Image (tube, coloured by chain):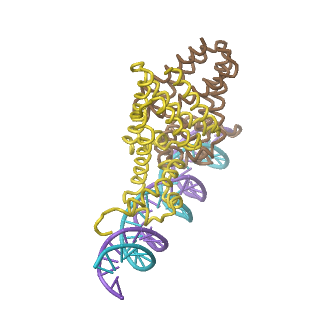
Chain colours: A yellow, B brown, C cyan, D purple
Amino acid sequence: MRINEVPAAVTGRAETLPALAEVFREHGYAGASLALISTATGLGKGSLYHLFPGGKAEMAACVLEDIDTWFETNLYRPLREQDSPETAISDMFDAVESYFRSGRRVCLVGVLALGTSRDLFAEAVRGYFARWVSALAYALRRVGGDGPEGTALAEETVAQIQGAIVLARALDEPALFTRALAALRSRIATAAG
Amino acid sequence: MRINEVPAAVTGRAETLPALAEVFREHGYAGASLALISTATGLGKGSLYHLFPGGKAEMAACVLEDIDTWFETNLYRPLREQDSPETAISDMFDAVESYFRSGRRVCLVGVLALGTSRDLFAEAVRGYFARWVSALAYALRRVGGDGPEGTALAEETVAQIQGAIVLARALDEPALFTRALAALRSRIATAAG
DNA sequence: GCATCTTTGTACCGATCGGTACAGAGATGC
DNA sequence: GCATCTCTGTACCGATCGGTACAAAGATGC
């Protein structure tokens, strides 16, 4: 391990990201204390600051990047590149349903967007939603062909997903999230058909 | 001031609530430190704990109650009781547009719903959204007459409002919020007409 | 003016915050 | 086996956390 520079470190980082993400999701950026992070990851402060010299801010930034990559790979790219836009859109709803655990799991990017920490991660937050909307709008235009209509429907769809997470959690009724996705599917099918 | 029991205290409380609400909105429950609260309200710790012996938790609870009362008076009751449900719904959108400052202001109840602090205020958060949905569903049923359809559309509408706040803030594009409200208005008009 | 009660600023409490320092354990190369 | 480098647990730092104690200031009643 003398020649190569950051092999084990990178590996170790990737493995902690899911636990880190969960802490930030549940407690927000301000509420995620190092003590919580330490227990959630099973790592002491020494290890944490070895992996993330930048502290909490770097942890959150890495988590955001990880999430962004996942969405880019599993949602945005298919929406843009898959041959059948109908299939891509349907796959998107499947992915959303399972990623957000049918409404039981919160969207970290949405949480950050609402807080003051938005300023810290403004660009990442903006990019995440902007690329979601634009990829979906592109797919909608391909399937429907209604010119600029796609963007409005894409915005409404992404907003509906975010709002459904809020509402499902507030009412403690995960079924509401699933229902909302089903309604969106049929709305889009109608608009396209 | 010997006979009556809590006159000045109550007055003082009500006057601090807007500033308190703003702090909780911007920083969340965990992020709203007493130092921030103190500067925002212009009150020292002595005064704050005199007005709210229960500390932060009581402050947040009072803010939530205040918000709930406002929505009950200005939105829910009109939706339930106004003669014309169409007017009530249109007034609701006007109120929402101005209350949320055209998407520049965040919904505190939504913020709390996403965080861990939801557990502390679960009942208040649940009630706020449950009554919003049910009042709107009732108005929609009165205007449309499609049986149980109203609840689904009401849920979608409230979720869309919440999601539009998230998205407008994330993209730093308040116009998106206004656009979303306009789309909802016409969707409801279509569904009703 | 005096006594009473309310209101408020300040000092302080222990706990916890994010972050640093560093010694020693553990792995690796030769 | 020994030197080198990576990793990690622990102790500690100053700052800030939410909350308390309390004395002085301000209002009020008579």
D8 vs A54, nearest the viewer: D8
**Quarter residue A166 falls in:** top right
At which x and y percent is residue B33? Answer: 50, 49
At which x and y percent is residue A177? Answer: 59, 35
> Left or right of A49: which side holds C5?
right
> Left or right of A153: which side holds B52?
right
Vertical side of A28 occupied by B130: above or below: above
**Quarter residue B52 falls in:** top right
**Quarter residue B112 falls in:** top right
Quadrant showing the C terminus of chain B: top right
Vertical side of A13 occupied by B189: above or below: above
| Residue drawn at x 45%, y 41% as measured from the top left | A74
> Left or right of A90: which side holds D3?
left
The answer to whether residue A158 of the structure is visible from this angle is: no
| Residue drawn at x 40%, y 62% as measured from the top left | A49
Pick out the residue farthest to the front: A83
At which x and y percent is residue A122? Answer: 38, 41
At which x and y percent is residue A37? Answer: 50, 58
A42 vs B48, nearest the viewer: A42
B164 vs A78, nearest the viewer: A78
